Amino acid sequence: MQIKHLYEHNLVEELRREIAELLSDSFDGYPKGRVFFHQIPAVRILASKNNTLIGHLAVDHRVIHSGGVNFSIFGIVDLCVGKDFREAGLATDMLKYLYDLAEKSGIDFLMLVSGANEFYLKRGFSIANNVCCWMMVQNNRSIGLVRRKLEEGLMYKAVGDKVWPETEIDLLGHIF
């Protein structure tokens, strides 16, 4: 098995088709043939075996703002593993790969929104209860700003020595 990262602009069409298929197989209601839900990510962590894509993790690299301070984050998007390769630790390996990349890149936090809290808690993430502000995107259109706590579960993992803020988080863009 091989895990690597690719910048979005370097993906070839064949790999885009493989990613779209894996996302569609992994998430109910994922738009068919698309490789992103709300916005194109900056980087993708890809796992393959015998030149076949078996795992995917998209990364939204951005700055968020809270209490007068900016934080550099990697937002975790669309983490999934092919059906035949689940329960083998591949998702954990991809998260570790991302954490190591974040450390080398001076990122403050890994961040995500998920309903799979138990999975992420076991891998060192914490639940955040902050009110958040983000741009609502629906059907490829910006429809306004939202300010509230996230029902799905906002989670984070510190990469460096910064402390997660307790004040409102401005995502400075869409939710991932």
Image (tube, rainbow, N blue to C red):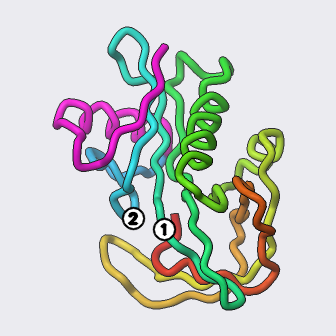
Q: Is residue 54 visible?
A: yes
Under tag 2, what secondary structure? loop
The residue lying toward the viewer, choosing from 20 and 103, is: 103
Q: Which residue is mark 1?
A: 62
Under tag 1, what secondary structure? strand
- Marks 2 and 1: CB-CB under 8 Å? no
| Image x and y of residue 5, in percent | 41, 36
The amino acid type, in three-letter code, at marker 2 is His
The amino acid type, in three-letter code, at marker 1 is Arg
| Image x and y of residue 60, in percent | 46, 59
Q: Residue at x 56, y 46 (%)?
A: 104
Q: Is residue 113 visible?
A: no
Say left or right for 139 vs 109: left
Q: Residue 24's mark?
A: none
Q: Residue at x 64, y 35 (%)?
A: 96
Q: Residue 38's mark?
A: 2
Q: Residue at x 57, y 33 (%)?
A: 94
